[in-house]
Image (cartoon, rainbow, N blue to C red):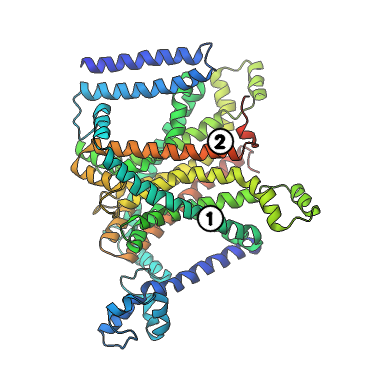
């Protein structure tokens, strides 16, 4: 256990250390400007003169002002503890119903993602079943399903939002549709692979038992596809979340983690952006871990887990 | 109303034809395997056109394919400008930098046991996160021009590439590595002659995944601020003006660019990894 976690912790510690160090050159100009306005003496005097100096040089020349770098209000790069404090404040100390609560925004994003993911993966599985059983469907739809993965579908997300809003659909449903669309194709492709994974020998065996098509489907194809299904569900849920977040961008003042990112970028609230970013990361990790947990349980009961 | 019925008939007609073709005697020839999906695509276009005309769907909801094609024809210079700004300047440069950086880091990971146990799990975790979210931050740091888009693309491409390349470099069997040792090959000789060629299928798999990510990153980053050209910029402006034919024209260009990019990578892959079982012709 120590052998496994030790290196990961060390790498994480190095990343956090580098982050704190990176804050110094990133934030030094703002820190010096504020200090000078309050009457401190800075070595190259005046904001304009400092423009020509490199940020690292400024840090070396003014070591006494470095301390304030990690606690600015609108830093270019907030320090890790500032982000954690903002996360704590907006999740634990603010009421969950308040507009500034990340719990509220996270819930809005999560519900759209969840609904979209369920719609997308269910219809993906259905289409995959159709493709496996109907040769015409296979030949006509499958190349498009594969080709569509090379197309930046995400780019049309804002358009779908605006179009659906002009028809009168707003809020949860349009976002869910986009996230459904994004989880749809990975599930189709993975599920088709999974349903086709039984070997000829297995299929022949079912034939010798004179199994019907539906019996073959339920007793052979469906169980055999489980590992493939879960692998593509994990990809699907991650892209569902990305879809929801991008879909929330055009709804600038609205709710959701994507809207929070955009409003943070409008008002230069960097700490807010980073907190929203970490919230999406935590959400994504939790969703993938949830699917992974279900996968482990299901495969174990099926006797497939290694 | 006649158009809607015609749409239905066209759908049914081509579907019957496709079923015949797919189940017919010639279904395994290359021509039919190409023809069937093309016919399916044509059906969708025809049905789309007829339904939009038949039901008088307003332009702001769904423009007909013909009017999209007309817009594409009229605004080739604009589309080309946007393409250069977003794809060539933003996506391609970011893609190149990201892949090169991932390659260098992957070599470090390959050389150090500690890094491969520490960094690879972290990279695996980060590769699953919605990295597009860094777009507002990077736009704030690198300004509105293509540099910030390239930076977003680098951030999106780096981790999947790192995971794929370092998995690929582990792909050789102990026997093959021992063979290299018995020939007294240095690390770099073994790297160039054994491990890198063995990693190529993984590398190209990563490149294919990242080709789409690069385009998505470059377009989405433009939603957070851009100069007065670029595909993402044009999409968000046209959506604001409700001129959806322009939006669809940009989507068409994005789809074309995405598939071509992917196609070029697949072609190079065929040429480089001709020895891999997945590239064998004929079954």
Q: Residue shown at 54%/17% (left/top)? A: B29
Q: Position of residue A206 (x, y in %)?
A: 63, 20
Helix, strand or loop at label 2? It is: helix
Instruction: Judge the density around disc 1: few (<14), some (14-19), many (≥20) Cα neighbours within 10 Å.
Output: many
Snapshot quadrant of residue B80 = top left
Q: How many marks?
A: 2
Residue A209 higher or lower than A46, as above or below: above
- The front one of A65 and A286 is A65
Snapshot quadrant of residue A204 = top right
Both labels 2 and 1 in a single chain: no
- The front one of B180 and A247 is B180
Q: Chain of mark 1?
A: B
- The front one of B103 and A211 is B103
| Real-space Cα separation, disc 2 to disc 1, in angstroms | 33 Å
Residue B173 lies left or right of residue A29; in this view the side is right
Q: Position of residue B144 (x, y in %)?
A: 30, 58
Q: Position of residue B22 (x, y in %)?
A: 49, 16
Helix, strand or loop at label 1? It is: helix
Quadrant (top left/top right/bottom left/bottom right) for the C terminus of chain B: top right
Query: Circle 1 is placed at which residue position?
Result: B102
Q: In the image, which is nearer the foreground, mark 2 or mark 1?
A: 1
Q: Residue shown at 63%/22% (left/top)? A: A203
Q: Residue furthest right?
A: B182
Q: Position of residue A180 (x, y in %)?
A: 38, 38
Q: Which mark is residue A226?
A: 2
Residue A216 lies left or right of residue B56; in this view the side is right
- The front one of B245 and A254 is B245
């Amino acid at each position: 256990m120590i052998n496994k976690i030790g290196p990961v912790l060390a790498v994480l510690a190095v990343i956090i250390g580098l982050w704190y160090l990176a804050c110094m050159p990133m934030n030094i100009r703002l820190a010096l400007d504020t200090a000078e306005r309050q009457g401190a003496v800075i070595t190259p005097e005046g904001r304009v003169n400092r423009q020509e100096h490199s940020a690292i040089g400024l840090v070396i020349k003014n070591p006494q002002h470095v301390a304030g770098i990690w606690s600015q209000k609108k830093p270019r790069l907030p320090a890790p503890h500032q982000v954690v404090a903002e996360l704590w404040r907006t999740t634990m100390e603010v009421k969950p119903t308040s507009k500034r609560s990340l719990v509220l925004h996270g819930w809005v994003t999560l519900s759209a993602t969840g609904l979209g993911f369920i719609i997308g993966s269910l219809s993906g599985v259905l289409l995959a079943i159709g493709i496996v059983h109907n040769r015409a469907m296979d030949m006509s739809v499958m190349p498009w399903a594969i080709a569509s993965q090379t197309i930046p579908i995400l780019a049309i997300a804002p358009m779908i939002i605006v179009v659906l809003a002009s028809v009168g659909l707003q809020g949860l449903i349009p976002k869910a549709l986009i996230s459904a669309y994004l989880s749809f194709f990975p599930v189709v492709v993975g599920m088709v692979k999974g349903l086709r994974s039984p070997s000829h020998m297995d299929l022949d065996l079912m034939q010798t038992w004179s199994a019907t098509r539906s019996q073959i489907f339920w007793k052979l194809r469906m169980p055999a596809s489980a590992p493939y299904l879960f692998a593509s569900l994990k990809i699907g849920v991650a892209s569902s979340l990305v879809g929801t977040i991008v879909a929330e961008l055009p709804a600038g003042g609205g709710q959701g983690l994507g809207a929070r990112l955009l409003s943070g970028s409008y008002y230069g609230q960097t700490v807010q952006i980073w907190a929203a970013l970490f919230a999406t990361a935590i959400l994504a990790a939790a969703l993938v871990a949830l699917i992974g947990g279900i996968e482990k349980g299901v495969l174990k009961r099926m006797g497939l887990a290694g | 109303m006649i158009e809607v019925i015609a749409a239905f008939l066209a759908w049914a007609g081509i579907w019957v034809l496709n079923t015949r073709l797919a189940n017919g005697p010639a279904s395994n020839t290359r021509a039919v395997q190409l023809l069937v999906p093309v016919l399916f695509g044509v059906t969708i276009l025809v049905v789309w056109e007829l339904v939009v005309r038949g039901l008088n769907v307003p332009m702001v909801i769904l423009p007909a394919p013909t009017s999209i094609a007309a817009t594409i024809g009229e605004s080739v210079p604009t589309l080309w400008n946007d393409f250069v700004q977003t794809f060539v300047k933003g996506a391609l440069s970011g893609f190149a930098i990201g892949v090169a950086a991932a390659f260098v880091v992957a070599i470090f990971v390959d050389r150090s046991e500690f890094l491969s146990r520490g960094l690879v799990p972290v990279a695996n975790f980060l590769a699953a996160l919605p990295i597009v979210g860094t777009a507002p931050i990077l736009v704030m740091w690198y300004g509105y021009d293509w540099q910030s888009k390239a930076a977003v693309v680098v951030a999106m491409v780096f981790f999947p590439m790192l995971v794929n390349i370092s998995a690929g470099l582990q792909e050789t069997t102990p026997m093959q590595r021992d063979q290299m040792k018995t020939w007294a090959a240095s690390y770099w000789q073994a790297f160039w002659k054994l491990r890198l060629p063995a990693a190529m299928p993984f590398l190209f798999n990563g490149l294919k995944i990242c080709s789409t990510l690069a385009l998505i990153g470059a377009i989405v980053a433009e939603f957070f601020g851009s100069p007065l050209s670029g595909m993402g910029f044009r999409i968000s402006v046209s959506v604001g003006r409700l001129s959806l034919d322009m939006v669809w024209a940009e989507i068409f260009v994005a789809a074309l660019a995405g598939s071509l990019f992917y196609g070029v990578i697949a072609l190079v892959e065929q040429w480089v990894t001709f020895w891999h079982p997945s590239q064998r012709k004929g079954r």
